[in-house]
Structures are given as C-alpha cells and as structure tokens.
Amino acid sequence: MPSSRLEESNTVLAARAAMSNERKGIRALIPFLGPAFVASIAYVDPGNFATNIQSGSEFGYKLLWVVVLANLMAMLIQNLSAKLGIATGKSLPEMIREYCPRWLSYVMWGFSEVAAMGTDLAEFLGATLGLNLLFHIPMVIGMVLTGIATYLILALDRFGFRPLEKFITAFVVLIALCYIVETVMSRPQFGQIVHHSVVPWLGNNDAVLLAVGVIGATVMPHAVYLHSGLTQNRVVPRNDEEKRKIGRFNTREVIIALTLAGFVNLSMMYMSASVFHGTGHTQIADISTAYQTLTPLLGSASAAVFLVSLLASGISSSAVGTMAGQVIMQGFVGFTIPLWIRRVGTMIPPAVIIMLGVNSTQALVISQVILSLVLPIPVIALVYFTRRRDIMGVLVNKPIVTVLAVISTVIIVVLNLGLLYLTFGGSIPGLS
C-alpha cells in the first residue's frame, strides 16, 4: 500500500480508536483534525485582508465586534455543514439535488458556480498581487505561477485526504504565525481590542458598509458547500453512537480552526487600527497601499511578513476554492471535469482583469457583491436539512441550535441585502 494511503488508513483506525476510548485527550482529537482547517482558509482569504485593513484604517478598533459576530456565525454554519456530511454521507449540493426539482438544482448550480468563480477571483488576485509586491514578479507571470502552485497543491488529493489536509493546515498556521509577529510589531492597545470586540458601534453609512463587507467576506458560500463534502466519507460512522462521537469531535475541530481564523481577522483589523489609523493614515483602501504605507511605518520586515501571509492566503484559498467547485459540480449535476480544466477555467476572469489593468481592489469589491447575491442559497438549504430528523437522525439540530441558525441566516441575508443597497448608492436615514 502506498505510504499516503497507509497514512489515510491509519487516520481512520486512529479515529475509531478514539471513538472506543482507546485514545484520549489531544491524541483522540488529532485524527479528526483537517476538514475544518481546510474550510477555514476561506475565512482568511484576500477578500478578508481588503475589508479588515480598510475597516481598521478608517475606524480604528471600533468594528472589531463585527469580526467577532461574523466568526461566531461562521462557527455555527460550518459546524452544521460538517454535521450534514457525517449524518447523511452526502454533500450539501447532493442533498439539494436529491430533495429539489431538477430545474431548481440546475439553477442553484449555475448561481453556485458563479459564486465559486467570484471567490476564486479574489483569492487568485490576492496571490498574484502578493507575488508582485514581494518578489516584483509581473502580474501576468505571477498569475501563471499562482495557477501552477494551486494545481500542484490540489494534485495532493490523489494521495488521499490526509496530505492535502496537512498542507492546507500548515498554511493556516503560517498565516496565524505571521499575524502573531505583526501583533508584536504593531503594539496595539489591548484594552481597546477587548472593549471594541464586545461593544457594538456603527457611526455612519461608511461604517455600515464596511461592517456588512466584513461579514460578507467572512461567511463564504463555497466553504459551506465544501465542508459537507470533506466530512461525508472521511470517517464513515457504523452506527448512531459513532455518529454522535464523530459529531462531537467535529464540533471541537470547528471551534479550534475557526477560532484561529477569527484571531487572524481580528489581528488584521487591530494591526491596521494601530499602525494606520493611529498615525493618521485613515484612507488605506487596498492591499498595495497598505504594503507601501506599512514599510516606512514599521519597516521592511513587517511589510514582508504581511506579504508572506497574503501570498499564503491567496495560494491556499485559491486551491480550496477549486476544490469547492468540484464538490459543487459533482453534487448539483452529478459529473466532474478534470481538475486542470477547472483550474484553467477559473483563471480566466482574473486573467482578463489583470491583462486589462483593472484595479484589483475594485475587482475584489465586485466579487464580494457576487458572493452576497449567492450566499443565502446554501445557508437556507443547510438550516432546512439539518433541522429535519428524517434526514439527520441522531445528529438533528437541537431546537436552540435551529433558532440560532435561523437568526444567523436572517442576519446574513439582511446584511447582504444591505451591502447591495449601499454598494449601489443607497443610504441609511439618521446616519451621515
């Protein structure tokens, strides 16, 4: 047996040993670590860089509570997605195809593919921009290198689920380490961080727009689809008791992975608040300007760490976005295309933008608007399926979980509609 397949088999055996109480403590959790870390990359992609940095530079620490709220909702939604895969052995797109009319499944597939391409647009541009700023590689060449790098990462999947999970998890840890370094260098005011993480504030229409943008850039449609696909056949439960135990381990992993992603998002914003807002640079609206401003303020080392985190984010999130595209197509319409064709296909929109010289930040904003239109589809479907006992069995939502999920769904839908309204020139009465 190839070593990678042997490792995958050993992971399943270790998981079963954990469920039978032969492994305890952290050793029991280790075999279940992976899916949530892969999904968590979507929560620290270049779209998050753009919204968090702009929010911190313009409003200081005041919008940190939005990051906390978005992260709590993300934990709940990703946990439901993973639980659906465990309970049914099917991904969310497969469930939609099974329970919805065929025409509706195709319509939802079309919208979801657009969302996947919109997501990849932000991620691909982020990685290409990182190569350009860090190594001075022309954007077109950087685009090709990003495509090759993400394809090589995705090729790990042929060796089983474990190598790819480890590789993506390493990227998550690298990004987090970069922001630990940035925290030390930027010396934020920790009292302000604690206060504004729990005290809501929305002072004007710009703040509302950025707050909605932060949430829109955090809860991602493709991550909701993907997580159910990552857990559906990873460790297959043999009875209801094993379903319960896998579900509990899954919840712990989601909390760990999304807490780490939440820390990264918080640190992006408070670094920007400390370095940019605190020095009067309140109009840092794109990644390039952030890098150029960061260099004289904190030095080249800090700027380089910032770009390393951006590059790691862009490459890994682009790979995960392509994985999600495969889950979406296979689930909704029952067929797949070769990975390299999907990789090339999703490169076309960012390639056009780069070659036409379109402002990358504007492209990121457009991609977030696209995601806002599509996001309600998977979230509403997920809440509908996970509340049904005939589908979920012993993993059906508890009533309080369903209530919280419905509240989160309403918040997400309303805020995303608000994002569209404000993006196209609307304003909220009473706010300047």
Image (cartoon, rainbow, N blue to C red):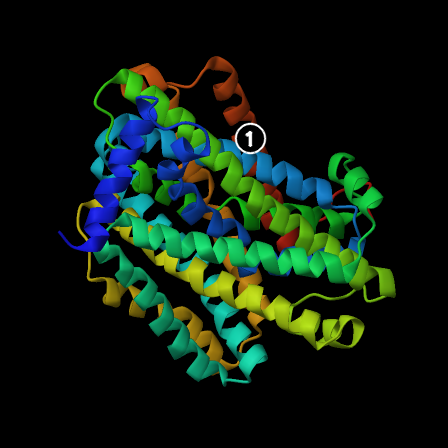
What residue is drawn where x is 52% and y is 81%?
A: 357
Residue 364 placement: quadrant: bottom right
Give the number of marks.
1
Residue 161 visible? The answer is: yes
Closer to the camera, 94 or 135? Answer: 135
Q: Position of residue 244 (x, y in %)?
A: 35, 20
Say which residue label 1 marks. 408
Residue 417 visible? The answer is: no
Work out whether 402 lies above or below 25.
above
Q: Position of residue 298 (x, y in %)?
A: 77, 70
Secondary structure at numbered mark 1: helix
Work out whether 245 lies above or below 320.
above
Closer to the camera, 200 or 315? Answer: 315
What residue is drawn where x is 34% and y is 30%?
A: 84
Q: Position of residue 259 (x, y in %)?
A: 57, 40
Closer to the camera, 236 or 431? Answer: 236
What residue is drawn where x is 71% and y is 40%?
A: 65
Few, some or many residues within 10 Å of mark 1 (<14, 14–19, 20+): many
